[in-house]
Amino acid sequence: MTEATIAAGRRRNRGPLDPNRAAYIFYPLLAAAVILPVCWALFGGFKSSSELFAFPPTIWPRHWTMQNFTELFIRLNFGHYIWNSVVVAFWTVLLTLFFGGLAGYALSRWDFRLRDVLLVLLLGLQLIPSTVNVVPYYMIMNQLGLLNTRTALVMIYTATHIPIAIWVLKGFFDTVPRSLDEAAMIDGCSKWRTYWSIIVPVSLPGLSVAAFLVFVSAWSEFLVPLVIASNKEVAVASVGLYTFFGPDSQTAYTSLFAATLVTVLPVVVAYFFAQRFLVSGLTAFAEK
Amino acid sequence: MTVEVYATPSLVARSARGRRPRINGYLFFLLPGVVIVLSLTLFPALYGIYISLTNLNLGYVGSKFVGLENYLRFFTWSDLGLVTRNTAIFVGSAVALQTLIGLAVAVLLNQRLIGRQVLRSITILPWVLPSVVVGLVFAQIFGGSRLGIANYLLSLIGVPQMTWLSNPALAMTILIAVSTWRGVPFAVVMLLGGLQTLPRDVYEAAAIDGAGPWQRFRYVTLPMLRPIILITIIMATGGSLNSLDIPLALTGGGPGNATEIISLSLYKQSFFNLDIGYGATIGTMMLIANLVLIVLYIVALRPGRGANP
């Protein structure tokens, strides 16, 4: 009797497919698992060394200090590493979108034999990991005389990221109506001009998703630059971080968190900026 | 850039005034990208196989073809058993955890609750953090000698202080945990994408037939999500097998060689011992494992591609 009433009451409030509010229990757990380590690392940059190694540790700095940052930028010259990362990521994004966009457009607009085979092949090639290729990369760049150059990094990153750009952009171009191309053609546009003046401007959302994915990935690359461009002059931020603060280094750990903040800031800002279209774009990509 | 490529339905687009040679319209767009990709993905992989057949060493000038000698060394390598065991434990545990936690989180985030967008943004965040940074930061969190924050958190529930990364079993556990922390967001993105495509009417039908939440998950969600789960597992396996950033920054293979996995061996043999030929041999073995995964991945993608043409 009572059970039936409760069940009936529950049914009136909440259909069987409505979300269960008990799920909220997991919200703080999940959020804390991500946010606690991230905040501890990011705020650590503003703590004095005595507070960093204090016990019990703090998350929110008791006394804010910029000392770690001055140390990082003046003594360790970390700005130079960040600059290298910026240069390499910039050219990688630009070249990847340029070549990936052209190829994506071809794969979207022309029907030719082996098109699907090529798309799958590109997907497969993209999955060859840099761990496997790092030894040949070293030898190739050595023979080309490009060891310890940013050019070598841009070349490798561009090649390894073009497939993902092709997939994202082809998917986007497929949603752009072909009637646009046809109208441009009737007006006498070449395919080349159609692409640059009609397709590219309406594809900015797709290009942004691709640019974001390539940027984050290029910014985070570690093994390839560690092996082929570890020279101080050309080292990128991830390599700088590892050489300064890795297991074998002698540098004081106090600047690690400041360096972490500076290194992750661009990607985290881009991530929250890109949030809205990103998740839907990624979801669409995952369904392909 | 005044190349004129005319759109014609045929494969061969003729140049306007016949002054230029014939250009295959699509090849002009397609080839540069494809050539770049091939020359720095496929070619290095093949070149790596060639290097593995030589005795190339960065410490010496010149090298000669030695056939399968490096492979003989690989299969009689005294650490092979240990490294294989470590790799299997690391990859197996990390993939299982990433998939299970990823599935649970994806189901949670698929509930139409207020605030789920914010939680989704937070959950996916570790995915964009450079993994070497993740490794270095967690090395500090568990940094035994410096009374890392992990010791403090555990001291709150009465667990004595530990030197985490110098205990072999703990170091492996932490390596798996940190890789999972970094890897869960990817599984969430994949699985949440899959969950959102599942048709609601099937759930309504199941609910009308009296299926509870667990039964709906077990008999509706899981079977329908299977292709995406499979792809997630394949991708996560590749990610863990090839991961080098986190292991190098977190444990570097230590203590001793308790967390020495195959990717670390490749790196150390090639660039510490300068034995490039042997490093390429390990790379070729890893390439074979990756090719198996890539084939599985493409096969797993097939049914989905047939379903929505």
Image (tube, grey):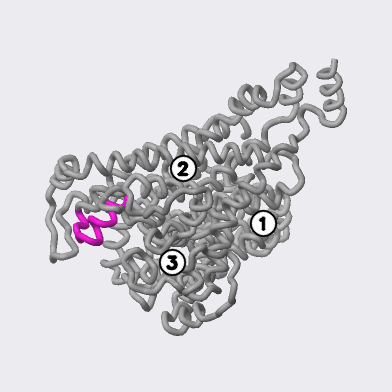
Which residue range is magenta in the image? B263-277
Query: Which residue type carries mark 1?
Result: Gln
Q: Give x and y (percent) for residue B206.
A: 72, 21
Position of the C terminus of chain A, as image quadrant, is top right
Q: What is the chain identity of the residue bearing mark 3?
A: A
Residue position marked by numbered label 3 in the rendering: A238
Tag shown at residue B177: none
Quarter of the figure with the N terminus of chain A: top right
Identified at 83% across, 23% down, the residue is A6
Residue A28: percent from left, percent from top: 65, 48
Query: As drawn, is A258 to the left or to the right of B281?
Result: right
Few, some or many residues within 10 Å of mark 1 (<14, 14–19, 20+):
some
Residue B275 forms part of the magenta stretch: yes
* Residue B236 tag number: 2
Q: Are marks 1 and 3 in contact (CB under 8 Å)?
A: no
Residue A102 is situated, as x and y percent measured from the top left of the image, at 55, 58
* Label 3 SS: helix
Residue most extreme to the bottom: A74
